Amino acid sequence: MPSPARSLRALLEEPGLIVMPCCFDALSARLIEQAGFPLTFMSGFAVSAARLARPDTGLISYGEMVDQGRNICDAVEIPVIGDGDTGYGNPVNVKRTVHGYASAGFACVMIEDQQAPKRCGHTRGKQVVERSEALVRMRAALDAQAEVRAAGGDILILARTDAQATHGLEEAIERARRFADMGADIAFVEAPRSVDDLERIGEAVPGPKLVNLVEDGDTPLLSPPAFEALGFKIAAHPLTLLSAAVGAMRDALGALGARQPCEGLLPFRDLQELVGFSEYDEELARYDLAAEEGSGPDTPE
């Protein structure tokens, strides 16, 4: 089986736009895989919400994110991109983040140019580091990528800039261009506000590009063919599953509170299959003590 990074590279070389629902835990990642999507992304917003019930404002730590990511990567065979935020510190911290995400099984890690503590890309109050610092941060990430490869591993780098919010679109495009020229595998200009912005990014930034689609967010929700025509390779949906899950849980809680039956629940048998009860029982049957009686090392001759 190819490595997660190699699988992602192969996806990037195929024609067409990749629609990428984002996950927040192992179960949501498995649902994405079972629905037939070839790629997912561990969303920092969604993990912070699901794991801590806290906002995506730098409150969740590197250790918590890499722990969550290890469980996600273990649960699926499709490649997973991990949200590495700002790299959790200075350039040496950035390198540790890249190494840690590679060890956890991620195909790719996203590193961004916000100041710490970062914020969700479609919220207000963001600040970015100066361009020179952003380039140093990206150089550290790429150096760590080279070290991972030299040690026999592999991971891709997704380079994100939030500079449009504070410095304008031209600065954001220039940063994304610089990241791509340095060797970043995928470029990501966060929160373009119009089709014209998207068109300018698609034309000016080389290589594979990601667009981030938050319902009720800043970026227009165009069709997949439209994004492909504009030059994008990946369309991420970071909060769709989390929002759907929260809505469904609220509906169920409302029904329980009203002493009414809950509608639309997954059948218990299907839930058991989703988490792997049948595979577990099949594996356990291989170690049936009754079947093995008389074959152990303590059996008298």
Image (cartoon, grey):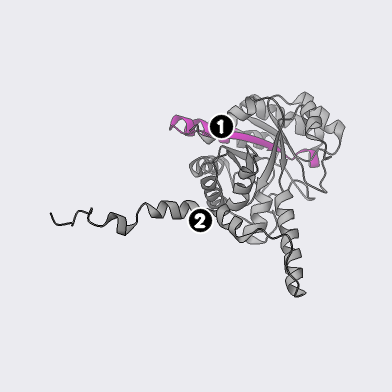
Tell me residue 91's x, y (percent): 57, 40
Residue 208: x and y, percent? Answer: 68, 28
The amino acid beneath tag 2 is Phe
Mark 2 element type? helix
Image location (x, y in percent) of residue 271: 60, 57
Eye-nearest disc, 1 or 2: 2
- Give whichever of 25, 200 is nearer the camera: 25
For residue 128, what is the image quadrant? Answer: top right
* Res. 83 in view: no
Kindly tell me whether residue 47 is visible in this rendering.
Answer: yes
In whole angstroms, how far apart are the C-alphas of marks 1 and 2? Answer: 28 Å
- Name above or below for residue 170 compared with residue 282: above
Q: Where residue 205 sits in the image (x, y, percent)?
A: 73, 26
Q: Report the quarter where the C terminus lies.
A: bottom left
Tell me the element at label 1. Answer: helix
Q: Which residue: 64% across, 59% down?
A: 267
- N-terminal of the pair, mark 1 or mark 2, is 1
Which region is colored magenta? 139-165
Disc 1 residue type? Ser
Q: Which residue is at a point 81% across and 38% down the rendered structure image?
A: 192
Q: Callout 1: few (<14), some (14-19), or many (20+) C-alpha neighbours within 10 Å?
A: some
Q: Residue at x 81, y 34 (%)?
A: 169
The image's mark for residue 276 is none
**Residue 227 or 276: which is nearer the viewer?**
276
Callout 2 crowding tier (Cα within 10 Å): few <14, some 14–19, many ≥20: few
Which residue extends farthest left?
301
Q: Is residue 260 magenta?
A: no
Query: Of the numbered discs in the image, which one, if any, rests on residue 7?
Result: 1
User: Label 2, on which residue?
Assistant: 277
